[in-house]
Amino acid sequence: AQSVSQHNHHVILSEAASLELGCNYSYGGTVNLFWYVQYPGQHLQLLLKYFSGDPLVKGIKGFEAEFIKSKFSFNLRKPSVQWSDTAEYFCAVKYSSASKIIFGSGTRLSIRP
Amino acid sequence: DGGITQSPKYLFRKEGQNVTLSCEQNLNHDAMYWYRQDPGQGLRLIYYSQIVNDFQKGDIAEGYSVSREKKESFPLTVTSAQKNPTAFYLCASNPPGDRNEKLFFGSGTQLSVL
């Protein structure tokens, strides 16, 4: 079945620490990949997306993600987090064979000031 | 301003009652989605619609129904058959085209059972 897994449910970091959130998807052919972020009290918004080309994609607020096809992964990274990065982060995938977008279970990121 | 409007913000349901959540968009998007958000489970797809008068079941459609009579509207009914309806419900839409998969989300409806 088509699915997305986020293995980190809650990550706690200090400011200036580096961040990597894992995302894996099940095999299903060509995919489009996304990271969405939900800041406290705000709408979900797109952080970055991968469609094709350079597997390292850069998004807003200094985030980036790397698509590793052989590992079915699309991990989110940021070299130095800030307190304002406190939010819930969702990985999502759209398989070319389907018209729906599937989300992972989310990772809650807490940053200690 | 263009966007997605969900109403009401909070909704309470009595046992055995059907309730309908509203979702309206003025973005001229063809595709619309309903997701359910539960703590620790992320967003799970309930129903989606790619075009007017057509919709498909998502991963957890049981106990829910939808209609898509107008492009801008995609209401979700939570029926009495949904035994665990307490959750945060999110409506989303996205524009047509393969490279326009960015979802636009509404502000959500929190449904609780009395």
Image (cartoon, rainbow, N blue to C red):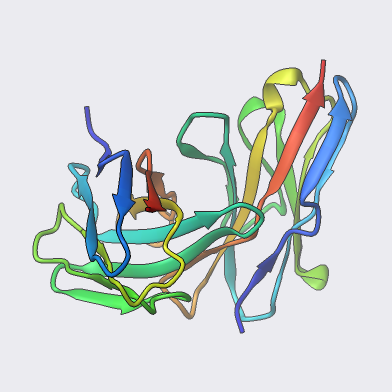
Q: Which residue appears at 25% of the width and 75% of the height?
A: B55
Nearest the camera: A93 or A105?
Answer: A105
Nearest the camera: A110 or A1?
Answer: A110
Q: Which residue appears at 36% of the width and 60% of the height?
A: B34
Q: Which residue appears at 62% of the width and 60% of the height?
A: B41
Residue A80 image-quadrant placement = top right
Q: Furthest-left residue in view?
A: B69
Horizontal side of A17 relative to B63 (left or right) equals right
Residue A92 locus on image (x, y percent):
58, 58
Q: Is residue B62 above or below residue B113?
A: below
Q: Is residue B24 above or below residue A78?
A: below
Q: Is residue B107 above or below residue B34?
A: above
Q: Furthest-bottom residue in view?
A: A1
Residue A89 locus on image (x, y percent):
65, 44
Nearest the camera: B67 or A69?
Answer: B67
Residue A91 image-quadrant placement = bottom right
Q: In which quadrant is the N terminus of chain A drawn?
A: bottom right
Residue A61 locus on image (x, y percent):
65, 26
Q: In which quadrant is the C terminus of chain A drawn?
A: top right
Horizontal side of B55 relative to B86 (left or right) equals left
Q: Furthest-top residue in view?
A: A113
Q: Which residue appears at 32% of the width and 65% of the height?
A: B15
Residue A97 locus on image (x, y percent):
48, 80
